[in-house]
């Protein structure tokens, strides 16, 4: 007997004798190995069960506990998908390409068939902290899709032994809640070409399952639009089978000068309430000195700089700390950035950038 099987549709439906009598709402239940009934986890009930309490057919064969993990840990509801293209600084080439390649086809599947069919999956590669996850979220927000986000390394570490089941459940739930975007970070950790000596049987099965599920993805399917977006910092480690399934590989590089400026301006903009005394010349200096910084480095740098005025205020009036407000702080200046830059340096080595550029020249999608 299999554990955690869900009883099939209608298996507890009372016999109405074909007289069209009242049918009480049916609540999907799980049964354990001993045949005892388990309540369906609340999260699964809330997100996946229909108004009659039944799970869609495709989900009934899955382990309810695994379904719950997918719903509570991988599915990003609501707020995760409010990212707009404007929230992503720079990356103009990638943004254009992504919209044409996958957003348009998912918005109008009828037009994008045959020769115009979109790729099943998309690979975003580049250094960490450059906006790959943001792009995944913006795609989902744009097509009002359900967004699923998982780090592939957690499939082998956090959910040891359950990875294969998780992958199957994840893609099945994504199909049920379509249109969906599945974002898989560090995808190389599951689809790596490297065969370690004692490659675990579980690891091999996980990889096979992932490839099978990727085959089933179709962003322009009329009734089951699922797009896979993989992200990696080590694209060269992917094996051929993975590359075939993500034929479009987009380089997401470090932000250019203009993008870095826009990140600083945005973080210090009207919503931030931070008083700034930065002149245009100061801004040019900041942009120049941050060549090689990633988007997340920039974010950390600005946060660090914003501490400067607070440190000064506390140094002068430590006793007032609890009642300090923004109005008591001196405006942010270039010196704060100079100090911050000592603590927050670029996290990506120039040699790594060269590696990405070489890979891009060989495999990157062109526009
Ligand atoms: P990764 O490329 O590793 O997926 P993320 O998209 O998770 O990077 O970015 C991490 C954080 O860095 C974001 O939440 C955001 O604050 C900042 N960031 C990175 N790239 C950009 C960008 N292009 N525009 C705006 N913010 C960015």
Image (tube, rainbow, N blue to C red):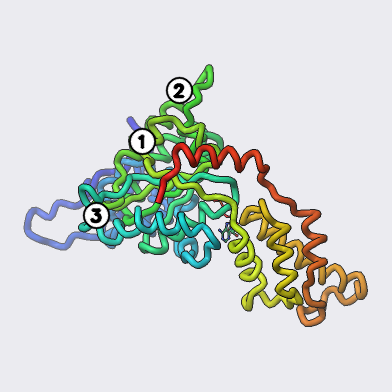
- Separation of residues labelled 2 and 1 (CA atoms): 23 Å
Identify the residue at image location x=20%, y=48%. 114
- Image position of 298 (left or right of 190): right
**Which residue shows up at 63% across the image and 53% down it?**
294
Q: Position of residue 109 (x, y in %)?
A: 24, 57
Q: Nearer the viewer, mark 3 or mark 2?
A: 3
Report how far apart the C-alphas of labels 1 and 3 lie in the structure: 20 Å
Which comes before the other along the chain, label 2 or label 1? 2
Confirm whether residue 67 shows in the render: no
Which residue is labeled 3 in the image?
Answer: 112
- Residue 71 screen position, x and y as percent: 43, 52
| Disc number lying in front (2 or 1) | 1
Q: Is residue 292 left or right of residue 7?
A: right
Q: Which residue is mark 1?
A: 244
Residue of label 2? 201
| Disc 3 to disc 2: CB gap under 8 Å | no
- 82 displayed left or right of 348: left
Up-down relation of residue 72 to residue 267 (above or below): above
| Mark 2 Cβ inside 8 Å of ligand 1 | no
Dot 1 or dot 3: first in sequence order is 3
Report the front residue among 116 and 41. 116
């Amino acid at each position: 007997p299999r554990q955690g099987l869900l009883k099939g549709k209608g298996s507890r439906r009372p016999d109405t004798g074909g007289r069209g009598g009242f049918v009480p709402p049916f609540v999907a239940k799980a049964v354990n190995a001993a045949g005892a009934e388990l309540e369906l986890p609340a999260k699964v009930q809330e997100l996946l069960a229909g108004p009659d309490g039944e799970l869609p057919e495709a989900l009934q064969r899955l382990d309810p506990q695994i379904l719950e993990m997918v719903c509570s840990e991988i599915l990003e509801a609501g707020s995760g998908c409010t990212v707009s293209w404007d929230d992503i600084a720079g990356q103009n080439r990638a943004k254009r390409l992504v919209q044409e390649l996958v957003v348009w086809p998912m918005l109008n599947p009828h037009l994008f068939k045959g020769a115009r069919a979109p790729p099943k999956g998309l690979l975003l590669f580049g250094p960490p902290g450059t906006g790959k996850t943001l792009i995944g979220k913006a795609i989902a927000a744009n097509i009002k899709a359900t967004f699923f986000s998982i780090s592939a390394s957690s499939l082998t570490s956090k959910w040891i032994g359950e990875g294969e089941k998780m992958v199957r459940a994840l893609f099945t739930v994504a199909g049920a809640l379509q249109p969906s975007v599945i974002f898989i970070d560090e995808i190389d950790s599951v689809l790596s070409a490297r065969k370690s000596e004692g490659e675990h049987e579980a690891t091999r099965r996980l990889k096979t399952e992932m490839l099978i599920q990727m085959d089933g993805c179709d962003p322009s399917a009329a009734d089951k639009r699922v797009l896979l977006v993989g992200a990696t910092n080590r694209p060269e480690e992917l094996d051929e089978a993975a590359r075939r399934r993500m034929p479009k590989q987009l380089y997401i590089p470090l932000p250019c000068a203009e993008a870095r400026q826009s990140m600083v301006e945005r973080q210090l903009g009207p919503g931030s309430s931070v008083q700034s005394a930065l002149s245009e010349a100061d801004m040019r200096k900041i942009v120049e000195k941050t060549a090689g910084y990633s988007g997340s480095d920039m974010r950390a740098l600005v946060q660090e700089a914003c501490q400067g005025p607070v440190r000064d205020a506390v140094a002068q009036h430590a006793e007032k700390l609890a009642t300090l407000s923004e109005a008591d702080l001196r405006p942010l200046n270039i010196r704060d950035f100079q100090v911050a830059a000592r603590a927050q340096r670029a996290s990506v080595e120039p040699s790594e950038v060269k590696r990405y550029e070489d890979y891009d020249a060989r495999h990157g999608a062109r526009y």
